[in-house]
Amino acid sequence: MELAHSLLLNEDALAQITEAKRPVFIFEWLRFLDKVLVAANKVDVKEKQKKLVEQLTGLISSAPGPPTRKLLAKNLATLYSIGDTFTVFQTLDKCNEIIKNKDDTPAYLPTKLAAVACMGAFYEKMGRMLGSSFPETINNLLKALKSAESQGRGEILLSLQKVLNGLGGAAASCHRDIYKNARSLLTDRSMAVRCAVAKCLLELQNEAVFMWTTELENVATLCFKALEGSNYGVRVTVSKLLGTVMATALMPKQAAVMRQNVKRATLEEVLEVMSTGFLNLRRNRTPVFDLVPLVLSLQAYVVFVTTLGGQWLERNFAMFLSHVLDLVSHPRATQTHVEAVYSRRCVSFMLRATLGSLLGEKAQIAAAKEICQAISKQMRAVEAVVNDTSNENKAGAADVSASQHVMVCALKELGSLVQSLSATASPLIQEPSIGLLETVTSVLLHPSMAARLAAAWCLRCVAVALPYQLTPMLDRCAERINNLKTSPEAVSGYSFAMAALLGGVHQCPLGLPHAKGKMVVSIAEDLLRTAAQNSRLSLQRTQAGWLLLGALMTLGPSLVRYHLPKMLLLWRNVFPRSQKELEAEKARGDSFTWQVTLEGRAGALCAMRSFVAHCPELLTEDVIRRLMTPIECAMTMMSHIPAVIKVHGAHLKASAAMVRLRLYDILALLPPKTYEGSFNALLRELVAEFTLTDNSANTTTSLLRSLCHYDDSVLMGSWLQETDHKSIEDQLQPNSASGSGALEHDPSSIYLRVPVGEAIPGPLPLGVSVIDASVALFGVVFPHVSFKHRLQMLDHFAECIKQAKGVRQQAVQLNIFTAVLSALKGLAENKSSLGPEEVRKSALALVMGALDNPNPILRCAAGEALGRMAQVVGEASFIARMAQYSFDKLKSARDVVSRTGHSLALGCLHRYVGGIGSGQHLKTSVSILLALAQDGTSHEVQTWALHSLALIVDSSGPMYRGYVEPTLSLVLTLLLTVPPSHTEVHQCLGRCLGALITTVGPELQGNSASISTIRSSCLVGCAIMQDHSDSLVQAAAISCLQQLHMFAPRHVNLSSLVPCLCVHLCSSHLLLRRAAVACLRQLAQREAAEVCEYAMSLAKKAGDSKDSTAINLNITETGLEGVLFGMLDRETDRKLCSDIHDTLGHMLSSLAVEKLSHWLKLCKDVLAATTDVGAAAPVEVGKEEDSEKKDEMDDDIMFTALGEDNKSKPSVAPRWVTRVFAADCLCRIILLCENADKVHFDLAAARSAKAKNPKGDLLVLHLSDLIRMAFMAATDHSNQLRMAGLQALEDIIKKFAAVPEPEFPGHVILEQYQANVGAALRPAFSQDTPSDITAKACQVCSTWIGSGVVSDLNDLRRVHNLLVSSLDKVQAGKGSSSQLYSESATTMEKLAVLKAWAEVYVVAMKIKKEAENKPPKVVRSEEEEEELGTTGVLPPDSLIILVQPELPTLSRLWLAALRDYALLTLPAEFASQLPPDGGAFYTPETIDTARLHYRGSWAPVLHAVALWLHSSGFSAGETADDAPAGSLRGPAAAYIPASSTPPAAKNIEDVVKDRMHLLLGVSIEFLCFPRPEEPIEHVMSCLQALCTLLDTPRARTHIAEDQLLGVELLNVLHRLLLTRDPPSVQLQVTRVVQETIHAAQEQLQELRNAKSKDDAVEKDAVCVFGEGGDTGGLVPGKSLVFAAMELLVFILVRHLPQLNTKVSDSPSHQAYRPQRLPEDSAKLVAATVTILADLPSLCSPAGSMTILPTILFLVTGVLRETAVKTPDNQVPPPVSAALQGIKTIITSPLARVEKTRSQWTGLVRSSLASVLEYSQPDESRPNMDDVSMLTAITLFLLSASSELIGVTSLQNGCMNRFRNALNSSDPWVQAKCYQLLLSVFQHSNRALSTPYIHALAPLMVEKLKAVERSRPGTSMELQAVQEGIKVLENLVAMGEEQNRVQLLALLVPTLISYLLDENAFDSAPLASKGLHEFALQDLMRIGPLYPSAFKAVIGAAPELKTRLETAIRANQASSKAKAAARLAQPTVQAAPTIKLKTSFF
């Protein structure tokens, strides 16, 4: 392939490769050329032009395939347009020659076609340069057209189109000829030719004025004729032609009109022409109903309107609407019911397609007004007829029946509009002038049921869009139904409306008040009860009653639960109780009573079905048993019905069918086991139903397609479901009743959920529905039937098919096959087998027979059934047999039918058995299918064979690897040779290619020769398909490239793929748009930046190139992202929209931080498109509206100018859904910036970064934009957008609250936006705001108040007042009158308010506490005071001032909420203990939803209650002294739950107890098992609450008195530690543990004190209190100490795993070097050690002996692991905690207890031994902190001296450590060592200190003597010497008088040796001078202390004396000089020495 990449064709290489590969080689060269010619240097091209032209023209006659000829023509034309043009006419002549050639053989055809293609390309590219030669060319082509076969005709017409395009108006002279020749071909038998003609005429009408003036009607007629027997492609192109011509007639192109004076058609004329076409086509074939014209004219209408544009539609909407509605009311459109349904469906489609996508939200509101007026006009006419009693108006009756169809269309569209507008539609409802609700409600009285249902549906749409209307509308309907009980229409209409509204509740998250359910039940009961009273109303009342009950069931179990007993009773009473009653019933009654009875039973069954479907939780065994009674009765009744119908007439058939339908429906939902006994009778009914035994009509089921595999749709053409025209194209499908759906076929669908992807339910006609239901139920029951019966049924099926003839046979066969498929599917799902040999045989015979059926759908079904059978039987021999049978058939058969059927059978076998099960047949299957795929004579065979091949490739996986190359080469060959008109073949080739790419998979990245060949083949295949004209093939190409990109991303060229995808985004084909977006989604995951760049470069290219073929692209400076945002407004397909969301999400994640302002602008532009004036401040709106109008004007001009189907222009302001998405994007951008870099949230840093790099972009610089966007969203009409806006606002406040404002120190940047925040929040607290928004707003309020942004009380009040007002709402209590939403919505709102207050209170208390803990401020000097006074800083506890007044109320409500929460968390088995009438804030009916709301808000409330109790010290209502308690007295004391006693009766102790139980219970319950999804903030709040609580004495006594409570708390905390990691949580846990331990200590202390007061017994007895008693045993589970130990050990081992001996002893353990713990861990370990050391105090002496070994081991272990030297000699927290712990333990009173003395001594000694061992110098621990170890040793020596005296080994060890420290090279260690030695030497117990003095003093003296030789160089070394001297001095002082001289003889000479020579003094370093001065001072102090001894020492050594004297003199002189310099006061010099002494003393 690489050899093909050269400018000239490499002919040598071409000659060397095999014949088969040449076309691919040539194609690859042409592809290369196509890219290279445009980019190449013109000079190079001109040099080689001659040779190139030769090579290219040579290729024309080499019979190139379709893709090759297309490329060839393109290249030749490009070559001429770039190079010289002088040989172009020769080439043209050559082409003309070829075209004129009379050779008609198939072999010569490709050459002719290539020549034709070249002609077209030349003219398209060069146009008027070839001007003179065009008449000859056109004549030539037209002549050829007459004699050509279909492929030739298509190609010629496409060339003509290009010629016309290139020449423009210049070819006017030939226009008529072309038109005459072309138009006759519009009815050509080849569909591809029809498409080509339509395209050619579409091009022609651009310039040929006559087409849309004089010939207008003819063109229309022609177009309608072109549709007979057409396919989808033809319908789309022809309707495009018709629509465009009509639009041009109305608004002609400027240029054409100027040339010829043309009379413009009026809108009336144009619409007239279109409607005559629409209606005329209805006239001529009454017997066979034909839909095609209808479908066409509607697609044409859509094109017509789209071409004229949204602007035009807005202006002329009224006229357009009345025209469209006239169409549907025309008698010719509605001759039969089915036709009427189809016509309505089409008109609805047309309205949706135009209004839905072309109009913006404002225009849609205007359109809705128009529709309202149309409806009321119709209604007035109807009322006139209905009220006209004199019957003068005969024609009126017909009008009424026609008006129903108008109503249905108008109401459907109105509903859809309101629903899509959602809350933005509120102006429609609120404006009285429109009166939408009145208008729609008036239709509920329309005489026709269809219109009433449509009105009900419309009301449901209103309720879903505007949930606040739901309750009032229900009430209104209920009131009317009660008032108008006597009108049949009213009963029916209003019950429809109520049912519809109830059905809509599930889409309204806020629900419905519970009482409404009761209201509905009573109305329904009343209707059923009174049904029999008045025969005129019986039927309606019965239907209405059951309809309402069925609708009620959709409200779900929580509501239905209350009415279930009543319902069960009603159901039981509808049916006869016994066999006898049934028999008796048959004998009596007339036809009318039977009709009412049947309708009633059908209704009851329908309500049951609704119950089973919507309340599965209530289906207990018992309920099912009670349901079965009426159901079984209904089954028995079924067999009696035929007799009744015989007696009373056939009009009962419909009612009977309805009963059957309902019965089948409910049985399908119940477990088959429940009705096993009735299988036989039931199966008889089912089989009779779908084999049409008693049914003379040939009704077919509509389920077959859904049961066949989705992928097989290409064989049946059902891919149509994926187009924009889905709803109307469905109607044209054979054997599907889809499209005939209408609400009146089954009123119950008005309340059921709408199936995904449908806008409005369309139940199928009753006949079809019953068969569908029977087939579905058959599938459910079949797996549970015995083998014998299965065999009987299968045989019966074969018999039925045999008996039937002709059309009926087809119908029966289809139904049977659907049932069999349904049964096989059921078997597979139940994992049960088909049965023994004879059952299989029978089934196989049935299936095999259908594989040769001429009907393709049946063949598909048979293949599918075969595969499913293989799956269910699952035996290799069976599979082999089936495969062999098909092999044999395929080898011998020659007819298309059996070859297609059996090839599909092979594919299905592989699909269902998988690669391994069918591996041995793989080779044969592949070889046969490859052979069939090459059968050029039948494209159908090729399609089926390739489809099966794709299935096999898919299912074989890696086993197919060996066949990839041959398959791939076949695919390529076919792609290059099959004519493009056979799109199905190309689609299957695309499927094959995709499957092959998946099979090769990641290998595609490889570089071996074979792999690169495969890869390039795949790329060539994709390129051919991308160039195909059919959108489906292009979509397949995209998905293949997507696969390739997944496996080998480097080899997919994004620079060409992305532009191609961008073009497809504007395609008119849904599938292509879907594929493009899906591909972009994948690309954006990895390479978002590249994708966006390529898209932008494409936009630039399109902008630069001035040629007429500039692609209609809509990429502006917003790039691809902007286009995708725009698509969100136009697309309705759910999959597509979700893919767009994902794509934008991926782009956002990878690009938003770099291109911040770009993305923020995008979001801002989308959000700024407000739809309504009321939304923002009036000033802004004025501006915005103007600019919007300006844009719209431009759009309008552009639309008329382009006249192309220009859907892509964003003429529509972003809709609310898109704006919500933009608001979500905003939150994501903030989050991304937070994760990216903290600079985004630091204004000072951001400004400096921006100054350095002006291109850089930081979020904080856009803060005003962020606030503005959040504000716009939060104040919008749309509720969803308001939620998103408030969420964004909350995020902004949280992230930016702490960002300081650099210009005003002490302030934050958010302060300037106070007004915006307040204004955004205020509307959310208005009366009519839905609860969920108010709840969210409360959250934002508390975040804002708590963020500390605002420090001025008055500013805070604004937001604070909102919370105060909502607090009043909360106090209103449960029974507030005007309730719109369900009780749980009220719960949500009230809890949100309480939660917000709680959060504010928590912050306030925190601020207050911090303020109290700060040291009092120093009194400032005057000037400072002045400065600060101006800023007006608030007192620190200002926030609490705001909360204080509300606290009495709040505390009461908080406690109530906590009580509720505690009850709601009880397990299900305690449900009986819940209060029957609910809690303070929830009602029993909404308990399940309420739980969720409580779950979100209890934690802050708990924390707040704990703080409140802490601050009031639980003393609520005790003392009136302190203000808060006084004010709380009333409410808090009064609010005592569930006790009728007066408040006084409950003493304060009980209140405390209750509250403690509540708070601890809630906390422990939560901490036991916090759900993983619970936010960590809840865990923290809960722990902080516990901490705060245990900080109060009352709570401490409570928890200490009940030891088990403490144990449980500790166990729960231990468990929490196991599951939650964050250090903050663990630290908080240790605080709670500490409080718990303190509580226990206090309790114990009190006990001991009390005991010692009682009896002054000996000291020992007092200690016995505490855990462990006399024995010392601690019981796990009961012992607090044990629980605490467990938890603390866990923390220690978690952070210091080396403490665990098991770890360190294990063989895999590597030696661990101690290192510094991170700060969090260090804090934690320190806290843990502190608590550990406190534990012994909780035990009795014996108990403490049990735990002390562990505790000492752990504490010394922590010391060992954390005593690591730090550079700044800081002591890490764990070390100081460990030292403190050792001290606490050693000094505890336990040492004095006699009993345990020996044990204690042993423990102390071994601990010291451990410490000594740990502190042993060791090269593995070079950085050990000796000082901490020495300190520990010293602690032992000082505190436990008695236990250690005389233990020589320990003594030697200790001395060693001190020695090492004295010899240490680190002066810090020396200094510390001297200090510690001093404390040892001074110990009161001489027995301890003497040995140390003897051992260590000599060493010290030596060290200090040595200083003379090496004087200190640093202050640290100096300090060490000073400390050493201090020790010596102390030793001197300790010595006895007689030894004093010897001791001084050591000290004084040493000190004197430190003095410096006066000459050396000046030059000495600082430390050295310091030493000198220190020594001098010391000597001068010692002298006077021991005068005699001092003199003796000095006298003994004269040289010492002289040194001392000189030093003193020098010192006096220097101080004299200093003094003189400073003050001339003589007094000072009097006693300088004394002065010095005192100052240093």
Image (cartoon, helix red, strand yellow):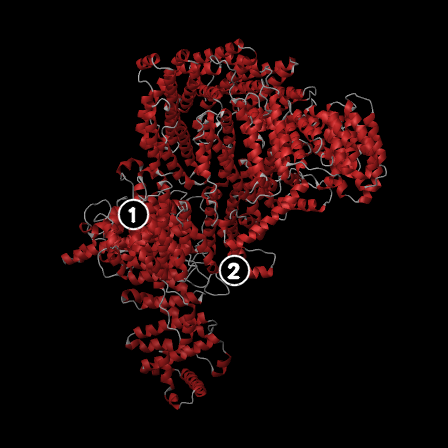
Q: Amino acid at mark 2?
A: Leu
Q: Label 2's element? A: helix
Residue 586: x and y in percent read 35, 13
Looking at the picture, tell me which residue is in the foreground, 1359 or 861.
1359
Q: Residue furthest left?
A: 1655
Residue 226: x and y in percent read 67, 25
Looking at the picture, tell me which residue is in the foreground, 390 or 1495.
390
Looking at the picture, tell me which residue is in the foreground, 309 or 776.
309
Q: Label 1's element? A: helix
The quadrant of the image that shows the C terminus is bottom left
In the picture of the structure, the residue carrying the numbered disc 1 is: 1456
Looking at the picture, tell me which residue is in the foreground, 1300 or 169.
169
The quadrant of the image that shows the N terminus is top right
Quadrant of the rendered image containing residue 170: top right
Residue 1170 seen anywhere in this rendered image of the structure: yes
- Give the vertical position of 892 relative to 1732 (above or below): above
- Give the vertical position of 281 relative to 509 (above or below): above
Q: Who comes first in sequence, dot 1 or dot 2?
A: 2
Residue pictured at 76% horizontal, 35% vertical? 164
| Mark 2: few/some/many CA within 10 Å (<14, 14-19, 20+) | many
| Mark 1: few/some/many CA within 10 Å (<14, 14-19, 20+) | some
Residue 2022: x and y in percent read 44, 86
Q: Amino acid at mark 1?
A: Ala
Q: Residue furthest bottom?
A: 2026
Q: Is residue 1851 left or right of residue 234?
A: left
Residue 1629 seen anywhere in this rendered image of the structure: no
Q: Give me the C-alpha separation between circle 1 and circle 2.
A: 44 Å
Q: Is residue 1757 left or right of residue 1049?
A: left
In the picture of the structure, the residue carrying the numbered disc 2 is: 1243
